[in-house]
Amino acid sequence: MLALAFAAASCCATLMAITLSRITVSAYRVPISSPVATSFGVMQNRPAVFVRLEDGDGAFGWGEVFANWPAAGAEHRARLLVEDMGDLLLGQPFDDASELFTQLTEKTHIRALQCGEWGPFRQVIAGLDTAMTDLVARRAGLSVAQYLNPRAEHTVPCYASGIAISQADHQITQSQEAGFSTYKVKVGFDLPRDTALLTGLFSTLGAGETLCADANQAWALPEAERFVAACTDLPLGWLEEPLPADASLTHWRALADQSPIPLAGGENITGTGGFADAIATGVFGVLQPDIAKWGGFSGCWPVAQAIRAAGQRYCPHYLGGGIGLIASAHLLAAAGGDGLLEVDVNPNPLRDAFDPWQGAAHRGTLTLSDAPGLGITHLPDEIAQFVTYSRDLHI
């Protein structure tokens, strides 16, 4: 029944068909002085892929494609859009964003199957769907959040993410000064050291502050069990991806049964069926779809609704540039609930140039723009120096 509910759900329909006349896509890379380390690899720079769609009447929308991994992923995904999807988009009529999402998924199935690159195809489609939803909401004169849900919130609470366990004292202090009260640190490097550092961090927190941990799929079940046992007495808000996303359900259930800490996951789950299964298992206290990795709004909006309907916590995953962060905020605002918006605290000019907080120094809450769509009219001038690939397709 849950899968059928997913299939029936979609974004609001537009009043007239959309025929795309122009697609512009650009890849970016920003050098960073401090690499961002996870348990599975290190980011040596900050990449992003931004896409703009325009119809024959001049209406436009912006989207972002996931590009953090692999290291060469940004340029590859931008070229994938141009060389493998442009012919499926330009001049083609679409009734709404969900039709674009469905058609592209179906029409690229054999292409993705032929090369085995399911992830890149899904990620490009997600970015295109976000851009199309931005376009149709802008054309309707509504913010994306209000387009999805007329009763959407105007603000969303945020939490500080991407905090290295080895630098957590300093980064949490900075995050506190920026107005955050929930923090997520990366673990999965050295289990005894990680648990010792986590224990010490709780003494730095004030009343009402929460600490979460993200293992980034670092462990098999025995190591995850040891971590949970060592942290049983710590009031962690959640433990994210302690197991690989494709670990057996038996292992996830075994860990959930013995963990007093809520388990979180979702950034590496794809498809309505995948999320329906994850919700139905009941092992996750927190589910975290990533709008730039799979689904865009057409996929992630019904998933967010299903998560909320199941009584689970919806906290969108995000660790990229400014367009995807703003899109995630609109999705969370539409979904409502007690979820938090993930905000990477590491420097990222490809996010900050969009000024998501509209000049506010306090980042514990993000206020959505009242402007139509996502509120983005053009790319910030200051990121032009970081372009590594750019193409413009038009008819």
Image: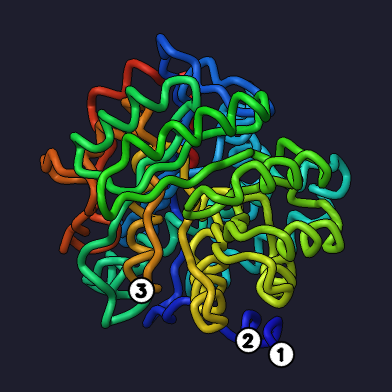
Bin the neighbour count of mark 1 within 10 Å (Cα to Cα): few under 14, some 14-19, many 20 and up.
few
Residue 44 vertical placement versus 14 (above, below): above
Corner quadrant of residue 355: top left
**For the view shown, which residue lies furthest in the front direction?**
233
Q: Residues within 10 Å of mark 3 (few under 14, many from 20)?
A: some
* Quadrant into which the N terminus falls: bottom right
Q: Tell me residue 133's x, y (percent).
A: 41, 64
The answer to whether marks 2 and 1 mark residues whose Cβ atoms lie closer than 8 Å is yes
Q: Which mark is residue 5?
A: 2
**Which residue in the structure is indicated by mark 3?**
336
Q: Is residue 241 left or right of residue 306?
A: right
Badge 2: few (under 14), some or many (20 or more) residues near its Cα, within 10 Å?
A: some
**Badge 3 element:** loop
Q: At label 1, which amino acid type do we have?
A: Met
Q: Position of residue 220 (x, y in %)?
A: 82, 41
Q: Which residue is mark 1?
A: 1
The CA span between labels 2 and 1 is 6 Å
Mark 3 vs mark 2: in front: 3
